[in-house]
Image (cartoon, coloured by chain):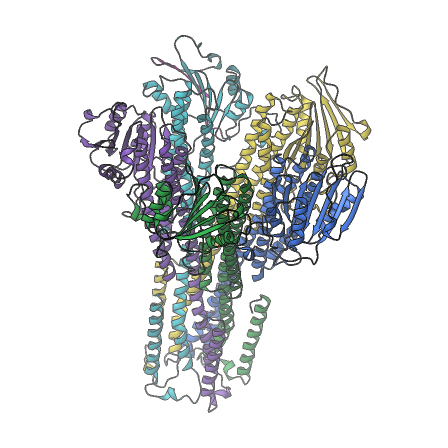
Chain colours: A green, B blue, C yellow, D cyan, E purple
């Protein structure tokens, strides 16, 4: 949700590392992958003392990817940050998992914040994870809140050597991670689209009190999802305009592709939002329509039986001098009168299309 | 609809060709048209081995147009792409038929994505086809999801030699295709306009529960149609600003015309959307008005018969000592009283304009 | 209306002249006015062979104004266009009377499209005429759909020699025509304002079902009127920024005045639109209020007579053992009881302000 | 109101002076104030022949302020305009009091149009006056529709010599007049704020039919007030960006202050508008709530008395064979039954919180 | 609230110091803190004669921070202003506590206005305090309306020497104060978020008349809060773009962090506003739903008892010749008929899901 539990941070000097957000994993797992076009080395780093500098530029061009799962141990993050020369504010943004997606340039690295979105497990409180990337020449350091699919997809691609990733530099690796996040957005769009469609069917078939609340929950998902995606547009756009030095020209065409996808996602979110707004209209009019129907039933019943009851009451009066009461065919005549009234009324309502 | 079935693509490296979208034709049909001011050669290419390079620049200036119908065989598209030096990302966009309209510049060609829109066959699920163009010097390669009218119109114009097309270069051919798509938008606008008008008449004559749903379906068509047109504005605008090298100056004046038409279409869509929004207001107020009418009938009936029934009930009481009951004109007097009540009530309601 | 009957044009090569729109006059009438500070020559040109070139620049500086009434004869327009070197796309825009207002620069002339608006004759379908201008050095060619006031106003001014028009160049003549169109917008604003005011009075005095439809018709007029004016803002703005070579510096200050007026008109349209939106709110709440009133009448009647009828029914029961029935003052006591109930109820409703 | 009575101007050549707007004062009063740091001369100019040129630049630096009250005598305005070299279009804007606020640069002067706003006297038709300024080096000519407070405030400041005004140039005098107008906006904001608050209290305490109309009148005031202020933002902004040569650098910091105030006023107007929109929501829901209440009363009454009346009716039947009628405790038993029904119903409604 | 009590200022020359706003503290308390990396001096200045110039640039680099609590004594502010060369307009903005947040550059200092927000004590009238900063080289002068937390947080950080503040210049001190204000916004967001959540629960569990008013109060808080935050975005943005000379490059990265936080706050406010708008929809539909329920009860009761009462009335008629009355099983047969009617009706309503 949109809650921001930053109060425990209030008053501390900027750059102080305080983990904000849920603790989503137990220990911090650090994986190091080093690859070039021909080889891949992969190992899990147990202690922080085994962190390694990226190899010198000369000779074979290696790309080093250090992946951390878990950002809730400020000390670990701080140590990693110090080792690789990451600015304290960057570290603060990494452990504070309530950032907006963004791309920031620091003196010798690019810092990228990405958000994932998952509303399947807890429909009331979608899970929004943060993936942070530090992109240096020949090196990417990624921070995940917990082990998730995004990074695994890219790892597998490196292991198998499929696609361009092994042939390209660290900026292409960063692009792959961003692309994986954006691809994951399309999966979410599909799920949300299916939910909206089932909601739409429910709305037309048998809307009840819960329908509106479900529509509003979907609207809130849309708001939160959009919040995770929207700022990425500008961020990738600034990458695309070549504002940052670290991206090579050959990668730019791929970034344009990601940019396009981000716009596509945002577009679809807007369309879903318009559809949800329309569904609220339909829901409200369906309430009114049902009230109309209830009122019609009441009116038909009252309009038929009130005159009848009156006629019956009329001949229930106790006047001495009521000649009809003594007529032989008085009773049948009154019954006939009543039947006439009913038939006339039904005819009238039929013409008004009320029955 | 806005569904995005990209999940099967999730996790694959960028540039992998996976057809996304419906399969709309059986086989891929490739047509080659080569023309200059005096001659037109046209042939269907059976195997991909017959693909031909555009003739050298020198000598007679030929324009080559290769048209593919069907984009669901990634291998074919890949082969064509490799032969003509098309970037893998472009190919990915061609087979993935859920692109937004756009114009992108690559090193030696312009890539144009266009969308058609057709809501006549399936009102619930308008068909949106994608037409992709690759514009190179003296050459246009076009990709259609299935054989449709747009390209045929231009083919006929080339065959007959009418207009400027045979005298101009490949950029004018690309313009002709874009222009044909935009002309097709006007046809759609006309159809949508007629539907809206008939909806409007229905709304005023006899609105029912389905009316609102029909309005909302129209609204959704508008959203989807706008989505197909809107991005074209910026795309053609960037062409117009001369951002791309491949368009000649003489073609620019025609592009300005297309740009104008696109804006006209977008304008009309916005106006239709405003009209549909107004129609929802009218619909909702018509429900309220009808409820008002129902309530009036009920109130009139109740207000007339309740006093009457009470009077009848009064003289139905069994008190020993009720002198009126024994009066000779008691009964007629009561009937007269009742008539007076009815007349007064009717007069009252007439004044209130309820009857 | 917003209907676009362009389908007959679909598939034709660009630059083909097909008249789109209503035929509003029988024959095409061509008038030639040639003037300088001292003299005015005016004649009606019968055949197209009498078209004349503007006189050479040297010597006396004449301004030539050729005015065509009627644009539905493509051949005539084409002939005029060829004679004066007008681009086929311009001619297409002239005969297709469904253009947006715009100003376009061609190699040796400026092309201006203006729209008039008239909702007085046919409130359901306002008449929107198109006036096209081609501005060349020392020459203006104007195309009207039918004879209307705008051009006559300017003609009279030229004839009488009032104002600056005879002393200035062709750009000032074009300005005069634009200014006359914008002045005419103020007249329309006045009329629309009066209609809105009378609607407002109707809304407060005695709103009925037609009121909402009248409000919506006004809204549609506003949409259509805005469509005729809005693009003019940008068009005149671009003139004002001196983007076009054909306007002299002394004319710019007049264009700024027109620009100001256009903004004033757009502003007023927006205000009218907000007022109309507010009127819909008032209308809807007036329906609810009336329903409330109906319900109150029903409730008051039911609440008074139901207890009375019950009491009457009570003493209409046929139990053997009902001592009240035999009491001497039983009947008057019951009547008193009933009166008490009525008084109490009326008191209650009075307090609730229902009666 | 937004009415524009320009029709009497239609068809006249631009630059023709026709007074548009109400005539708000009898005669035109011209005051001349000439001051420098040490001296102030003030006189009323009786005839237009006494108009004086600003003294030559050399020597003592005097500032001349000519103030005209009343703009409905075109001849006077024209004479003044000709004397001081004011462009006919400027004069047209001065006598046509339906301008938007604006700042325009002419060859040798700046032209400023300001609007005042007063809704206290005529709540239905707020009075909007126009103050026009012509700023020349060492000279300001101001035109008011009638004598109002704005200019008097500044006159008094000049007379008393308080503040910077006597030490600075004519641009500072113009600034003082603009500042006085903006200060006057704050007074209006206060009044409108108080009205909104009293409306809000009325809305919560006892909303009636007039409340909505009062809210809408306030909304209209807001629209008109915003119209008077909004364009000033851009106008002052362009002054601030130093686009005009006539403002000295020391005055710029004061203009920034005015700019800030204008934004503050616009902000507050927007907030008021949002509050009014919210009040309409509350009003509409209060109608619904009241209807709910009416319906509850009706339902409670009907639900209690219908079963009772039925029971009474049951034992009013005339069947021969109805043993209950002959029972000794039949009547009390039925009364007990009725009491039970009532108690049960009341209990039910109490639980539903309807009574 | 949005009230602006500036009327007492109307008519005074610009630069006149008049305190506008509530008087929130008794006396003005002036604290001077002077620090460098190794030392901190702190003292309360009793009289204004003890004000001190910042020490000369040479030698040890000291930063001087003068903090004033209370801005309602214009004389004090004026004296301080004159001593440190602050422009009269700046002083006017300091004492007039109804400024928008802003950053303005003067010749030799930067002027920063910040707003705090507190809705906990007075939910109807949130308290909005103003903190003004004057940033000069090596010096910061801060003005608070009353002693609050923001400045104390920074004071404590200086005293303890934690973080970068003691090592950096006066621009970093200004940054710390801005950062403290923005951190305080996150606390407010949390509180508002909790209120919204509790409102949401109330809305779903048991909405009553007060719920809507509570939602609207929250909406107003959002409007006011946004007003305090929104302009800060542009202000910090202009700092960030390096438009001002006084900020060092090392501070810029911190300002980017603040900028990010401000955008985060604005984003959250927008999301809250959308949620509140959705809650109004839910509230209105809940009223309609409840009315629906009331109507259903009424209809069910009427529909069951009206036919019954009619049947009872029928056999209450006094016709001589009504054979049923004499039948032995007439009475039980009628009771059976009535039971059948009830069962049928209940079955009908059950199927319609009304009971």
The residue most toward the front is: A59
Q: Is residue C152 visible?
A: yes
The residue most toward the top is: D59
The residue most toward the left is: E46
* Residue C119 in picture, x, y percent from top left: 62, 42
The residue most toward the bottom is: E328
Residue D20 is inside the magenta segment: yes
Q: Is residue E313 above or below residue A168?
A: below
* Residue E283 in picture, x, y percent from top left: 41, 57
The segment highlighted magenta reads: D16-40
Quadrant housing residue E229? top left
Q: Foreground residue, B140 or C220?
A: B140
The residue sitting at 19% across, 25% down in the picture is E50
Q: Foreground residue, A185 or E285?
A: A185
Name the side, left or right, on which E158 lies relative to D55: left
Position of the N terminus of chain E, as image quadrant, is top left
Q: Is residue E156 above or below residue E213?
A: above
Name the side, left or right, on which E346 lies relative to E218: right
Q: Is residue E174 above or below residue B11?
A: above
Position of the C terminus of chain E, as image quadrant, is bottom left
* Residue C330 in picture, x, y percent from top left: 33, 77
Q: Foreground residue, C192 or A161?
A: A161
**Predominant secondary structure, magenta span:** loop
Numbered marks: total = 0
Residue A140 is inside the magenta segment: no
Q: Is residue E227 visible?
A: no
The residue sitting at 27% across, 40% down in the picture is E150
* Residue C124 in picture, x, y percent from top left: 63, 47
């Amino acid at each position: 949700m949109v809650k921001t539990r930053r109060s425990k941070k209030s008053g501390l000097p900027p750059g102080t590392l305080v983990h904000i957000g849920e603790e989503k994993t137990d220990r911090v797992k650090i994986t190091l992958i080093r690859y070039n076009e021909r080889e891949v080395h992969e190992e899990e780093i147990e202690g922080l003392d085994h962190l390694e500098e990226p190899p010198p530029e000369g000779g074979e061009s290696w790309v080093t990817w250090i992946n951390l799962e878990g950002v809730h141990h400020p000390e670990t993050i701080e140590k990693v940050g110090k080792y690789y020369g990451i600015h304290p504010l960057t570290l603060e943004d990494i452990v504070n998992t309530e950032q907006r997606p963004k791309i920031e340039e620091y003196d010798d690295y690019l810092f990228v914040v990405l958000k994932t979105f998952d509303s399947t497990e807890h429909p009331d409180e979608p899970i929004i994870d943060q993936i942070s990337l530090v992109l240096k020449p020949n090196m990417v350091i990624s921070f995940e809140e917990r082990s998730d699919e995004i990074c695994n997809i890219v790892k597998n691609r490196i292991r198998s050597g499929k696609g361009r990733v092994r042939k390209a530099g660290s900026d292409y690796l960063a692009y792959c991670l961003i692309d994986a996040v954006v691809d994951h957005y399309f999966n979410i769009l599909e799920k949300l689209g299916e939910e909206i469609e089932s909601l739409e069917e429910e709305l037309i078939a048998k809307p009840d009190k819960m329908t509106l609340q479900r529509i509003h929950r979907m609207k809130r998902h849309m708001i939160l999802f959009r919040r995770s995606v929207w700022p990425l547009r500008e961020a990738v756009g600034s990458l695309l305009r070549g504002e940052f030095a670290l991206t090579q020209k050959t990668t730019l065409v791929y970034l344009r592709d990601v940019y396009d996808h981000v716009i596509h996602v945002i577009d679809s979110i807007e369309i879903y939002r318009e559809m949800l707004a329309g569904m609220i209209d339909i829901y409200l009019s369906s309430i009114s329509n049902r009230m109309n129907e209830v009122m019609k039933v009441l009116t038909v019943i009252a309009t038929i039986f009130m005159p009848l009851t009156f006629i019956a009451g009329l001949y229930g009066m106790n006047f001495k001098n009521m000649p009809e009461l003594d007529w032989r065919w008085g009773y049948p005549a009154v019954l006939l009168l009543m039947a006439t009234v009913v038939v006339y009324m039904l005819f009238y309502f039929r013409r008004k299309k009320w029955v």
